[in-house]
Amino acid sequence: GSAFPGEETLAELADEFCRTEFEPYVGTAYDDSVLLYWYLYPTESAWEDYPFFMCTLRDVDGAPLFGSAYQSGW
């Protein structure tokens, strides 16, 4: 029921959240990891139906990940 906060605000919130949650999830500090995070957030037109963002992981070299990165220490 809240108004769309804007792309810049969503990007800032998503970046902060994903960075904070990275180490507890992966099991290693972000700066020491072979993984990178990225985030997805809805457009203004999708905000009413999907008011959330999602963190994703990828290998720093762009190689596909297979399996879970949960507590992997990657």
Image (tube, rainbow, N blue to C red):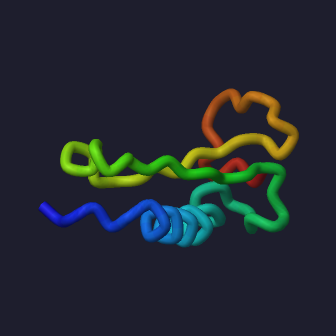
Q: Residue at x 58, y 57 (%)?
A: 25
Q: Residue at x 61, y 67 (%)?
A: 19
Residue 71, image x, y percentages: 64, 52
Q: How many marks?
A: 0
Residue 67, image x, y percentages: 64, 30
Q: In front: 31, or 49?
A: 49
Q: Is residue 55 left or right of residue 27?
A: left
Q: Residue furthest left?
A: 1
Q: Residue at x 51, y 63 (%)?
A: 11
- The quarter of the picture where the N terminus appears is bottom left
Q: Residue at x 28, y 44 (%)?
A: 45
Q: Could you say which quadrant of the image residue 29 lies in?
A: bottom right
Q: Is residue 32 left or right of residue 36?
A: right
Q: Is residue 47 left or right of residue 73?
A: left
Q: Is residue 35 above or below residue 16?
A: above
Q: Could you say which quadrant of the image residue 20 lies in?
A: bottom right
Residue 59, image x, y percentages: 78, 41
Q: In front: 15, or 69?
A: 15
Q: Is residue 9 above or below residue 67?
A: below
Q: In front: 1, or 62?
A: 1
Residue 54, image x, y percentages: 46, 49
